[in-house]
């Protein structure tokens, strides 16, 4: 083969790769470290590096990113597969990569605030000992956040966005439950979270309601105290009413689940007793909550 023929063949190979990339990946969605020409070798390396039994946060995270990478290859999204494979290899080496930043991807403006708040919620848990105290759940929460961010950037697979988001929120509820200080002797505590400026139950919130009701079934006549709260992103008077609506929503849901109404007291405290103190105007997901204490 002549030199000109080799150059022509090489150019054709790269042109085909570029065309394939354009067909299988959302333009501008994949982070800058991704490379469709190396995704296969990186995934192969990661498969060999992931431990069979993960007991540390980085080890668990490597397995989570392998799952994401494998999933993206099923859809032909090799650049995102490579991105997750690279993160998995970092984790497999014993160093935990951070959850992806919102600025990494072209997120629709209407979704940026929610995702930024979710990332901050995750980082707060991770920095608050979650990596050591609940490494497997923490790794699941981080991978589901990165999955949600990636799917939201593509912004067309509605079911995938909802799945990743829902799994992230469920993992965070479980994670924060494990990190929460131990309640007073004989008391149990639960937290039901709400979306911004909403007082209706999410599927994850309904799971918590069901868990509370099931825990009371057939037991002693426990008393439940509900305290609704709001973040500081709206006027104080409005947040007070919103917190009361959230408390009533949880109250009614518990009654529908079989808890006698006369065993429940519910009140709202607005933005005055936030679990996470913030400046005025900040949207903090952990402050959009109804705290349930069972005594």
Image (tube, grey):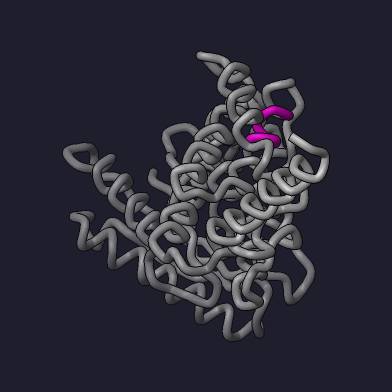
User: What is the x, y in percent for residue 16?
Assistant: 62, 52
From the top left corner, tell me how far across and down residue 135 is, in percent. 60, 28
Please say if 227 is above or below 87.
below
| Residue that lies at the very extreme toward the right in this rendered image | 3
Q: Is residue 191 above or below residue 171?
A: below
Estimate the x, y position of residue 89 in percent, counting from the top left. Answer: 69, 28
What is the residue that sits farthest to the front in this orientation?
A: 2
Name the image quarter holding the C terminus: top left
Q: Residue furthest top?
A: 52
Q: Magenta region's main secondary structure?
A: helix
Q: Return the residue nearer the eye: 125 or 273.
A: 125
Depth check, front residue: 222 or 7: 7
Q: Is residue 263 above or below residue 201?
A: above
Task: Please provide the residue range marked out in magenta.
Answer: 85-90
The residue nearer to you, when weighing 276 against 203, is 203
Quarter of the image for residue 258 reads bottom left
Total tally of numbered discs in the picture = 0
Residue 235 can be seen in this image: yes
- Residue lying at 60% horizontally and 33% vertically, measured from the top left: 40
Depth check: give the residue in front, 84 or 170.
Answer: 84
Q: Residue at x 23, y 55 (%)?
A: 259
Q: Is residue 223 part of the magenta span, yes or no?
A: no
Q: Is residue 188 left or right of residue 17?
A: left
Q: Is residue 274 visible?
A: no
Q: Position of residue 12 (x, y in %)?
A: 68, 50
Lateral position of residue 53 relative to residue 39, left or right: left
- Residue 6, quarter of picture: top right
Q: Quadrant of the N terminus?
A: top right
For the point 56% across and 22% down, the residue is 47
Q: Residue at x 63, y 48 (%)?
A: 79
Please give left or right for residue 119 compared with residue 219 in the image: right
């Amino acid at each position: 083969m002549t030199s000109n023929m080799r150059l022509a063949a090489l150019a054709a190979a790269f042109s085909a790769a570029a065309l394939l990339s354009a067909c299988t990946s959302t333009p501008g969605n994949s982070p800058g470290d991704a490379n469709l020409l190396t995704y296969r070798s990186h995934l192969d390396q990661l498969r060999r590096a992931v431990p069979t039994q993960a007991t540390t946060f980085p080890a668990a995270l490597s397995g989570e990113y392998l799952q994401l990478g494998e999933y993206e290859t099923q859809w032909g999204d090799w650049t995102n597969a490579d991105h997750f494979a690279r993160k998995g290899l970092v984790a497999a080496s014993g160093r935990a990569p951070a959850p992806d930043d919102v600025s990494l991807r072209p997120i629709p403006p209407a979704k940026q605030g929610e995702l930024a708040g979710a990332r901050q919620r995750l980082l707060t848990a991770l920095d608050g000992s979650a990596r050591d105290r609940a490494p497997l759940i923490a790794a699941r929460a981080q991978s589901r956040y990165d999955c949600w961010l990636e799917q939201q950037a593509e912004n067309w697979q509605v079911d995938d966005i909802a799945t990743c988001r829902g799994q992230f929120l469920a993992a965070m509820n479980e994670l924060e439950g494990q990190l929460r200080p131990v309640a007073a002797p004989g008391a149990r505590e639960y937290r039901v979270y709400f979306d911004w400026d909403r007082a209706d139950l999410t599927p994850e919130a309904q799971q918590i309601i069901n868990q509370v009701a099931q825990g009371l079934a057939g037991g002693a006549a426990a008393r439940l105290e509900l305290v609704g709260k709001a973040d500081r992103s709206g006027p104080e008077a409005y947040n007070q009413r919103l917190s009361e609506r959230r408390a009533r929503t949880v109250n009614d849901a518990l009654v529908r689940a079989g808890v006698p109404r006369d065993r429940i007291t519910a009140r709202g405290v607005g933005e005055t007793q936030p679990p996470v103190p913030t400046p005025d105007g900040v949207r903090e997901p952990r402050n959009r909550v109804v705290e349930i204490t069972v005594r």
